[in-house]
Amino acid sequence: MTKKIYQLVLFCFSLCLPNLLIAENVETIIAKHIEAHGGLEKWNKVETMKITGQFTAFSIEKDFMAWKTRSGEYYADLQLGQHRVIEAFDGKKGWTIDPWQEISYARRINTGEENVFAQKAEFTTPFFNYKEKGHQVEFIGKEKLEGLDVFVLNLTRSNGKTEKWYLDANTYLETKYESKWVDFASEMPSETFFDDFRSVDGLLIPFFVERTFWQRDRVMQIENIEINPTFDNTWLIMPKREEIKKLAFLEGKWDVKMETWSRRGTWREIGQTDSNIDFTATNILQEKIKFELTFPIDVTISYTFNETTGKYRISLLDDYTSSFEVFEGDFSGQDFVFDNSVEKKETYIQFTISNKTDKGFILTKKISHDQGKTWQKSDKFTYTRSE
Amino acid sequence: MLAVFLLLQAPITFAQESEGWTQFRGPYHSGISTENITDSQISDPAPELIWKKEIGCAFSEITLSGDKLYTTLSEKTDSLSGWEYMAAFDAKTGKEIWRNKIDSIFIDKDGFGDGPRSTPAIGENLIFSFSSYGKLTAHSKTDGKHLWQIDFIKEFGSTLPRWGFSSSPVLVDGVLIMEAGGTESRAFVAFDPNTGKLLWANGKGNASYCSPLVAEIEGQTQIIFANQKTLSSYNSKGETLWTYAMKMNAPTAMPTLFDSNKIFICTVRSSGFEIVEVKNNTVTEVLQAPTMKNDYSSTLYYEGHFYGFNVAALQCISAETGEKKWTKRGFGKGSLILVGDKLLVLSDKGLLAQIKADPTAYAEQRRFQAIEGKSWTAPSFVNGKIYLRNQTEMACYKFN
């Protein structure tokens, strides 16, 4: 009986043995890889990193700067051919200004880009504290890569995306990795190659990184690395587009005096209400205003910018009448004027925001029955900041 | 006695008298010069700079005949306009001899580079240029004056490609051949070079970025076009010899002929390259492999192997199996020619490397910064001298 139990234990152990060996090999390889890079102790003292150098895209070499943090934040300012590109990532979400996509303002990145920015955010390879980061690593085996003996590791990131890493079997330094990359926000396979390892404060870092994806070739040649510089978290706040910034004066909580144009040709007060105007998204300013005259009115007004027409687009959703109107407009001097002529209705409505100060502004409504040739005053809303 | 000695030495340096570099990719449309250059050591100084000068933006190769070189250039008159020119220079000094307007300047909205893309072809008395907006012009060799000009957009209904008309003219059996990308089966056209008279038109397809390959296959002159998804061949009379459905779309790199009847075709936006064999005007696939993906730079063939840019890595692969022999990075999306048994590789930033064409190992013999700036144009080699250009500079270095 004892013999049978012993045999069973031995059998089970033999089944587990290859996995144990592989697990040991993964850990051994990664330990030596980190040691080759300067050791975990030194790397654990790195909180932030600033990289400057030359970045080549479309065969044009230009300056670039990138900042990275231990918690996976990343900010870069680089030149991609003829366009300046900004990239920012807080470890989970990010944004970019990339004029190549014919978008001149900051936009949120998609999941494929988040994966790319996560790769860019690594100090060097993702193997430092990979378990803490939620990555998994599997040892595939030893191979020849362009005449070089390499260890092949499969890395599964915490986001589920996989990468294949090739580490020089002699130096344990990375020579290449394959991963998903993006071109014009579309995912595609990439190959990244490392060379020119140099010591920076005892940390060994590749100063030459070349990446190819689809027909693209990108080369990063590092010139300087600064360890633990100040990282300004405000860099990660997605900037509003310039046009929307001009409407920021509307943001706030307001007391609103409502007046109507009387037959006597004077403004007559018809009530008071309050309004809340806030950014519901980086580039969408939204007003919610309720008031009751004869009927209860509940209106949501969204201010956006229409890239196609180069004009502001304002939508007005009226909860009471279940109606939706679209207005377009722009600044005219100090005033902001928008109307619904874009909807080609019989009656045109025009709003003008004027008398802007830190404390308030006036919104005036006019009506036209002749396609905007003549306008009649209708209503006036005087906004005064309540807090 | 010394003169006799020098005469005896000369054929050793230049095994064969130069045939000029009269068309895109050289005398054999292959990127290969039959001249030789001597081995060099890494420690050797850069070859002697004969001349270097500024030149207006274009992607044309430099073509040479006699003591003159010909290329295109552009100059802006303001930020939105300017002209494309055909120009001739003294090959010994780089001094401009003449220039002639060929068209309005093509301004590349992506910033890759303005001006002409196509390489001029040199005939006996005439030079043929093709502008980015599709004007084929015959110039007098002596002063550049226009003898005739054909506007492909007006004449053939050709559509302007996004990055401009780029295909280069070729002269075959006294006929001028062009890819026109015209409507009504006028994708490929032939002209009387002296008059510009249309001799024939055939084939379907839009104007591409690929230039026709001229090859002698089974004793027959063939003009081979890789256009969209079709590889097709015509004789100089315009008769279709064969067509083949490629497993790729829209190659930019010129096809490469080898083993007398095999054709290597390749594009970067595909799963690799394809080799087809032509027998009795029937085409069969011989090999398909992922180890070479050319973008705009064409691959060349030498002794059983291909040398070319796999996206942005210089690579040697077996022509028989496609097996990768070696890879060398650091040239970006460069270009290359073969002189004797030496590869002359120009990086996309103007660094020139001399490398022995050896499949067993990457064997670099010399490198130097030849020109400055973005360099997407392959070199030309004539009489022991290399001629280089990019968007801003043109230079001549003497080898040996």
Image: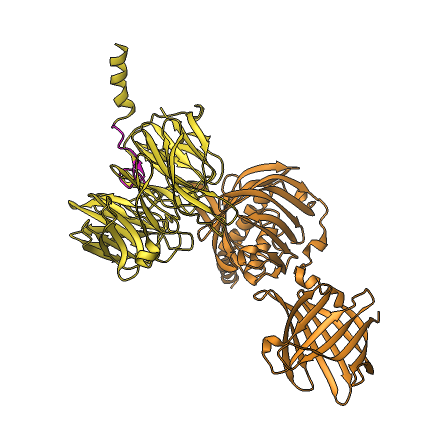
Chain colours: A orange, B yellow
The answer to whether residue B54 is above or below residue A294 is above
Residue ID at (70%, 72%): A286
In the displayed image of the protein, which residue is found farthest to the top? B1
Q: Nearer the viewer, residue A198 or B345?
A: B345
Q: Position of residue A306 (x, y in %)?
A: 60, 67
Please check the rendered image and state whether residue B18 is part of the magenta-colored stretch, yes or no.
yes
Numbered circles on residues, count: 0
Instruction: Tell me the residue at 33%/54% (across/down).
Output: B152
Query: What residue is shown at x 25% (from left), y 17% (from top)?
Result: B7
Q: Quadrant of residue A117?
A: bottom right
- Quadrant of the snapshot with the N terminus of chain B: top left
Classify residue B173 as left or right of residue A291.
left
Rendering coords of residue B294 (x, y %)? 38, 48
Does residue B68 appear in this view?
yes
Nearer to us in this view, B218 or A153: B218
Q: Is residue B356 magenta?
A: no
Residue range (magenta): B16-32
**Quadrant for the C terminus of chain B in the image:** top left
Q: Tell me: B232 left or right of A236.
A: left
- Provide the major secondary structure of the magenta segment: loop
Residue at (37% x, 35% y) in the render: B98
Q: In which image quadrant can residue B170 be found?
A: top left
Q: Report which quarter residue A99 is drawn in.
A: bottom right
Q: Position of residue B303 (x, y in %)?
A: 27, 37
Which of these two is toward me, A3 or A78? A78
Observer able to see residue B370: no
- Please state the horizontal and vertical placement of residue B32, each as a whole percent of the image: 30, 37
